[in-house]
Amino acid sequence: MENSNKEMKLKYDKTVWKEMFIYFKSFKKDFLILCAFMISLAAVDISFPLLTQYAIDTFVVPRNLEGLWVVAVAYAVLTVALSLIVFLFIKHAGKIEMGLLYQMRKDAFEKLQKLSFSYYDKNAIGWMIARTTSDASKISETVAWGLVDMVWGFAMMIGISVVMLIVNWRLALVTLVTVPLLAVISVFFEKKMLVSYRNVRKINSKITGLFNDGIVGAKTTKTLVREELNREEFGEVILDMKRNSVRAGTISAGYLPMALFISAIGTVLTLYFGSVFIMGELITYGTLMLFITYARQFFDPVLELARIYTEMISAQAAAERVMSLINEKEDITEDSEVLALYGNHYDQKVENWEPIHGDVEFKNVDFYYKEGEYILQDFNLKVSAGQTIALVGETGSGKSTIVNLACRFYEPTGGQILIDGKDYKERSQNWLHANIGYVLQSPHLFSGSIKENIRYGKLDATDEEIIEAAKTVNAHDFIIKLEKGYETEVGEGGGMLSTGEKQLISFARAIISRPSLFFLDEATSSIDTETEAKIQYAIDTVLENRTSFIIAHRLSTIRNADVILVIEKGKVIEQGDHHTLMALKGHYYDLYANQFIEEGERDLLNQHDKIKKTSRDEDLLSA
Amino acid sequence: MKNIFKYLKGYRAVFLMAIISIVIATAMQLATPILIKYAVDSVIGDVPAGNLQFIMDMTGKNLMAVVWMIVGINFIRGVFLFLKGVLSSYAAENIAQNMRDALYKQIQYMTFEYHTKKETGDMIQRCTSDVETIRRFLGVQIVDLGRIIFMIILSVAIMLTLNVALTLYAVALIPVLFFFSYIFFTKVQKNFKKSDEAEGKLTTVLQENLSGVRVVRAFGREKYEIDKFEDVNQNYRKTTYRLIEILAMFWSSSDLLTLFQSGIVLVVGAMMVIDGSLTIGTLIAFITYESMLLWPVKQSGRLLSEMGKTTVAITRVEEILNEPIEHALPDEIEPEIEGEIVFENVSFSYPDGKRALSNISFTLEKGKTLGILGSTGAGKSTLVHLLQRLYDYEGSIRIDGHELKTINKQWIRRKIGLILQEPYLYAKTVKENIGIIDRNYDEHQIAEAAKVASIHDNILTFKDGYETIIGEKGVSLSGGQKQRVAISRTIIDHDKSILVFDDSLSAVDTETDMRIRRALKKRSKDVTTLIISHRINTLAEADYILVLDSGEMIQQGTHDLLINEDGLYKRIWDLQKMVV
């Protein structure tokens, strides 16, 4: 969508493809082999009519059976050769296509692992997925099969022209006279079709969007009684779709007949002049037959080349997008010294990693996404090992920024963050990340079993360690109650589990490696009382003896924190422990009172529900 | 198959014309080699015209005339090919349009019940790619199929008139080629599916990695993720390469078969010419017909297997179209609504037998406010959904004395504004979303509604203001903002006599909550209001309060009454007092 202007470009852009081929230079040998296959295929294709001509002139016309077996054998040889080459070139082009695709996807994925969160903030996940999947496959397809058709097409055209010119240059010129016209017409129609089908696809995605609105929003539609209006709007779009599709259909319906007619004119010219030449005994029957066949054989390559040309134009936008992802500059990079000592993602030199004690200091930290629009300015905070810091404030106040900076998901734009007294940029990201535990507000699990998900926190964890971690956060009980226990599949994104259960598993995952620093973004959504109590327990356990930063919502968490920071617009407006802040009767006091009521109401409702349920259970038991 | 033809209805004549066009075009295509044969044999050579005497009669021994005839025939062919293309695309697009319209309409009018259970992704798939499969079949494949069948019949017929013996040689391998192609394309479906699945897995890993990027980074699991992606990437490459290999095998061996078949014609034909039983021109014509015949045979296998896919797609589309929809009954009334609501022994059970409400009775006078309190699953939402007839009920619900069941559903839904807790906003601009129920609202009315719902100022902070597009392609709103847009799009209609808030202020802070309710009250005193809320402050202002639990009414009365009665309401109220 965002590139729609670029996509409408109808000119072949050499620089894009040059960049692409430089990127693919490791495939050079494969490309050359494929070219060789295609040239031999064209040679065989050209030989068949020659053999026919030879048969007609040598045996058929003079009515001579002697030696006809040579033709049969030669024909058989050519047949086998052709089938073999067809098999080999399809296989090889397939190998190249898959190889290119694999390479692009691998590079794109690795790049995505390195790009900082600011890239993720700017680009939608759907956008990144499309680059890595459909755009990449469009390029590999166009390059691999485009090369096949292009080399074959050129080889055919050159080969046929040369043979015809040698056999009879006059008739050759007659046969070739319509080719330029055919080429012009083909390119013209291909371009027209490119534009009109692009329109159709655009409307098509609109239709998908409307179906989405209609299906997902069906309940809302009912309550608003918008059925008729929705249908009217939809009706307009599908009418538009029909008109555009019929137009596109008409253009493509015109293309082939037009091309075929031009080609027929070529054949007819060949037939006419050929016949005249035969009558003048300038050429043989076989030669006439040869030229008629060649006239027809010239048709496909011309159309193919026109198609490849427009396909390359249409794949250009995809190529630009994929290359821009692969060549994207990384925000957070590491010094070569740091890399040498601590290793990179692939080769982590764990033996050189110092243990973390847990002191964290923000020293005059500034942070902004856009120059001038500070999120944090001159922020200072000193945390000693083992302390719990609760961050309180409205959405967008800068709480998450502090956590993200501490985790080095972003780096400060000014000032320093010290861990155990040393700027964290002097050590590697992996070193820091190996020492932190992190639990998100909305827990994210990967498809796989519960066990695999907990093991994500420590890849070499034994089953005992996993159970141990689950027990620590009180998740063990619910896990073993599941039919398959720790082997239970959590589904895509953890969809088979409830939010509370996902939360507990993400706690287990965070503490299994016994991190020295712990970051928690507390969930706001309400969870049933039982799980709520478990999570509370998990939080209490996890925070013990660890330096922790919590974006806190629960009163109990806030109350128990060593330091509470009330943040507004990137500034700490109140700081201290619970009692100090309550005594201030300021922001914290208001926040607390509000939260107290909300939480109390929820608890009462839930408790009530629970009492009711247990008493019903008791009724059942006594009955 | 029968179903496919049902959709052709109304366009049968167009399809017929398309097929006639393709038949004419094919006939013209097949005529060209005959004319070339005639030119070679009887114009250049001296072979008697035989059963081509009619051409002799028309052109004589004039090469130029034959040439013009070929040009003319090819021109006619071009015209009919074009007609076929236009006609079949016209018919297919019209049918696709009808099908899309039918599906969309069906979805709009299906029951509320259905929409609570449906699988969104699958349904969208049916409405888009299944329709596309059907459209392609109708637009391209059906006519192609006609062409192939006709091409085979006609070219064999012509060959038979030219030379029976050589014809037998010429079609010897055709059945083999056909079955080979058909069996192959049926079998290879499995490999296509495998490749699709491998791609699906790759996308899942990618998707999970990107949406879980915070987890990946926090645990320093970049290498682990790269390895995981390597697996699926490698797997897709292998699976798809295997598919390509199989295709390579098919195309090369079918080429072998085809060339072998042509070789037979060439060699046997040459021998026949040599022994004098065949003319050169006939041989040339045979070679040409052979090549015209072989290509469609190779394609037919693919076409037939595509047809299998179309049948599946049609079944899937029909499954949606056969679902029951909401109907208007003949004697439904459309009364003016003042806003008095009476529930008398109202009960409701879901179709699966789960009891959701039992014996609810209350009376709410016009202009009064009813507050509803209860835990999750207590039946609060179900109760208010009954008012809009989203479900059918047992017992009696009367609005201004009219039994609800006798009132037209759409009519009553227009009179009762129901705001859901998790409202859906359409992928349109903010302005369009607020004015969604009627396109005639002007900017003032929209801004006024937004002001009442306390969302106007928020909207102005968006870069494009009221023109900001909501959803994936635009800005994503917070839960509270969504709820307020939902309120404004409902209250924009001043004619609503009943407003129902299904916990639809839950994500809005307490102050704003109050501000919105005040603004509404000020705007219209006569509106009967039902509010589901967990906020005691909100409920306290209601004229009457119901406390629900597991589908039963456990307490009811005014605020003053309930705070003096031991129960859930009082306990929550006490909590409130503790803080203030």
Image (spheres, coloured by chain):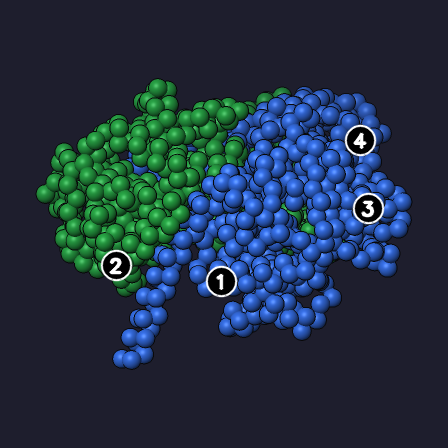
Chain colours: A blue, B green
Look at 70% across and 33% down and name the residue there.
A378
Q: Residue at x 55, y 49 (%)?
A: A578
Q: CA distance from mark 3 to mark 4?
A: 46 Å
The reply to whether the C-beta atoms of the residues labelled 3 and 2 are less than 8 Å apart is no
Asked whether disc 2 touches disc 4, contact meaning CB atoms under 8 Å apart, the reply is: no
Alpha-carbon distance for marks 4 and 1? 61 Å
The residue lying toward the viewer, choosing from A604 and B492, is A604
Disc 4: which residue: A18
**Element assignment for label 1:** helix
Sequence order check: which comes first, mark 3 or mark 4?
A: 4
Q: Are marks 4 and 1 on the same chain?
A: yes
For marks 4 and 1, the one nearer the N-term is: 4
Under mark 1, the amino acid is Ala
Taking A535 as reference, is B424 left or right? left
- Chain letter of mark 4 equals A
In this rendering, the count of numbered labels is 4
Determine the CA span between mark 1 and mark 3.
Answer: 38 Å
Q: Which subunit holds the residue at mark 1?
A: A
Q: Position of residue A344 (x, y in %)?
A: 82, 50
Instruction: Please rate how many residues cluster around mark 4, counting C-alpha atoms within 10 Å: few if below 14, some from 14 to 19, many from 20.
Output: few
Q: Is residue A140 visible?
A: no
**Which chain is home to disc 2?**
B
Amino acid type, residue under disc 3 in the picture: Lys
Whether labels 1 and 2 belong to a single chain: the reply is no
Between B27 and A616, which is closer to the camera in this rendering? A616
Given the image, what chain letter belongs to the residue carrying mark 3?
A: A
Location of residue B21 in the rendering, given as x and y in whole percent from the top left corner: 46, 33
Whether residue A511 is visible to the viewer of this picture, yes or no, is yes
Residue on which the image places disc 2:
B566
Question: Are the residues flagged by discs 3 and 4 from a single subunit?
Answer: yes
Q: Is residue B143 left or right of residue A113?
A: left
Q: Say what amino acid the circle numbered 2 marks.
A: Asp
